[in-house]
Image: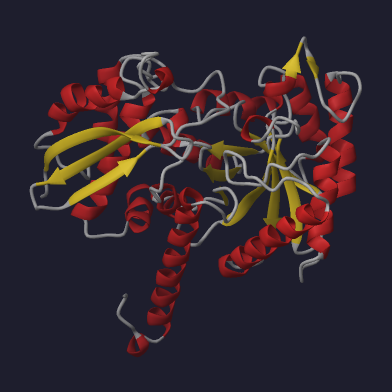
């Protein structure tokens, strides 16, 4: 049995240049693992608390030294000598040490950094790849496969320059396409999108999530450009290529109305509902995330009831990877899919419990990055290990996003080699 010898955390920067937490664990076998946690720009009001120093003289008050110190002085000493494969036991310890309902004492950025590091250490102690270890530990999926991908190719809202209300416009390859074909489609589309924007004299800078943040006038312009781009690829729109959106509607919900630049007057909930029906018909939307404010539950219910059979209605800010909120949404039939972000809840154990509940109710599971990412590819292994339906890691652009796709490529190759070996053991090749 391997045991934890040392735990150490430090402050690092995420992809936005904002501090986050990195944690390392050393085992008595000499093995060591390191992981880091992401952070969101658009946060749901019900998600776990990310602890910040609030020292305005340093890192604009966004420092994470308090969370780091909580790991090094409070959490770490409690783990010395423990077996890393006892994930639930250690996650429960984190929950107990924090003692709050939202991780506000130690910080979800502290507890998740440790929880992720323990999971990586358990995989190392078991001599397994992380995705294999996750599958064997939780048994949420009988087969190992690469999930389908949701690529955010245009950034708006808080992720963009402020001229588009919708936070993300997605390219979604047909689910019958394998991962390599899907990634090729995304790369082709992303570069063709650059050409289309250039031809229109639009700005081609990128937003926080790595997607283009062009100076378009309204959301309809973005949809039209995506359709035009699709026609420049070898793929067929609404057959190979589909569109989706992360609306993040809470960000433009004011005075009980939705303020869209597409309209001269703010929209009521009913008018917003009609807006989605129109977008669905015009642009074949197959994925709509956070279409309404998280407390506008009647509208969630109506949208799911009317187009839920053909569209993924995805809860992010509504559900914040919280089991209680998920079960309420299941009961009220508010949506049919959940976005999973471990840092919204603060431990791997609680994240798994939410995935288990979603699976039990036949919901789609989408494992997601955050806008403030690091080059850690933990989330790619985690998504494969839990058998996610989709992953949302951003566009094929910028190192912190590319790291996840490159890891999926590596896992895909390993899975193909394993399948070949099972079919014909004499053809087994060493993994390089």
Q: Name the side, left or right, on which 82 lies relative to 131.
A: left
Tell me the quarter of the image containing the C terminus.
Answer: bottom left
Location of residue 387 in the rendering, given as x and y in whole percent from the top left corner? 49, 53
Q: Name the side, left or right, on which 72 lies relative to 307.
A: left
Residue 175 shows in this picture: no
Which residue of the protein is positioned furthest toward the bottom in this rendering? 426
Residue at x 84%, y 57% (from the top left corner)? 228
Residue at x 26%, y 45% (from the top left corner)? 34
Residue at x 17%, y 36% (from the top left corner)? 7
Location of residue 41 in the rendering, given as x and y in whole percent from the top left corner? 54, 29
Q: Name the side, left or right, on which 108 lies relative to 356.
A: left
Which residue of the protein is positioned furthest toward the front in this rendering? 201
How does the figure colour the protein chain or chains? secondary structure
Up/down of 403 relative to 323, above or below:
below
Which residue of the protein is positioned furthest toward the top in this rendering? 255
Residue 232 shows in this picture: yes
Q: Quadrant of residue 103?
A: top left
Q: Quadrant of residue 259?
A: top right
From the viewer's side, name the closer residue of 46 and 267: 267
Location of residue 376 in the rendering, given as x and y in whole percent from the top left corner? 38, 48
Q: Name the side, left or right, on which 122 lies relative to 353.
A: left
Residue at x 75%, y 59% (from the top left corner)? 195
From the viewer's side, name the closer residue of 419 and 405: 405
Q: How many marks?
A: 0
From the viewer's side, name the closer residue of 404 and 205: 205
Location of residue 276 in the rendering, given as x and y in whole percent from the top left corner? 84, 35
């Amino acid at each position: 049995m391997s045991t934890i010898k040392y735990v150490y955390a430090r402050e690092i920067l995420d992809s936005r240049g904002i501090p986050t937490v990195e944690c390392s664990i050393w085992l008595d076998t000499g093995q060591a693992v390191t992981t880091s946690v992401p952070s969101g720009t658009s946060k749901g009001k019900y998600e776990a608390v990310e602890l910040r120093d609030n020292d305005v003289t340093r890192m604009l008050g966004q420092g994470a030294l308090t969370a780091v110190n909580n790991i090094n002085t409070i959490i770490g000493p409690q783990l010395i000598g423990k077996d890393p494969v006892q994930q639930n036991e250690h996650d429960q310890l984190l929950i107990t040490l924090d003692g709050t309902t939202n991780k506000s004492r130690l910080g979800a950025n502290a507890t998740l950094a440790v929880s992720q590091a323990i999971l990586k250490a358990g995989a190392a102690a078991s001599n397994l790849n992380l995705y294999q270890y996750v599958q064997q530990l939780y048994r949420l999926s009988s087969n190992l496969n690469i999930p389908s991908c949701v690529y955010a190719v245009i950034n708006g809202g808080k992720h963009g320059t402020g001229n588009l209300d919708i936070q993300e416009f997605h390219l979604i390859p047909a689910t019958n396409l394998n991962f390599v074909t899907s990634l090729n489609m995304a790369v082709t589309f992303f570069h063709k999108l650059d050409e289309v924007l250039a031809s229109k004299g639009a700005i081609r800078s990128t937003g926080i999530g790595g997607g283009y943040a062009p100076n378009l006038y309204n959301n309809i312009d973005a949809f039209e450009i995506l359709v035009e781009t699709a026609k420049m690829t070898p793929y067929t729109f609404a057959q190979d290529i589909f569109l989706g959106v992360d609306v993040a509607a809470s960000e433009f919900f004011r005075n009980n109305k939705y303020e869209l630049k597409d309209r001269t007057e703010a929209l009521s909930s009913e008018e917003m509902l009609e807006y989605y029906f129109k977008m669905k018909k015009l642009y074949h939307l197959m994925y709509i995330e956070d279409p309404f404010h998280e407390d506008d539950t009647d509208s969630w219910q109506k949208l799911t009831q009317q187009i839920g059979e053909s569209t993924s209605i995805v809860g992010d800010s509504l559900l914040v990877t919280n089991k209680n909120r998920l079960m309420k949404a299941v009961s009220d039939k508010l949506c049919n899919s959940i976005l999973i972000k471990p840092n919204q809840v603060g431990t791997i154990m609680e994240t798994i419990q939410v995935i288990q509940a979603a699976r039990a109710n036949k919901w789609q599971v989408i494992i997601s990055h955050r806008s403030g990412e690091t080059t850690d590819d933990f989330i790619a292994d985690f998504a494969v290990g839990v058998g996610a339906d989709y992953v949302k890691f951003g566009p094929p652009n910028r190192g912190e996003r590319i790291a996840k796709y490159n890891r999926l490529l590596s896992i895909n190759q390993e899975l193909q080699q394993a399948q070949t070996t099972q079919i014909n053991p004499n053809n087994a090749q060493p993994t390089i």
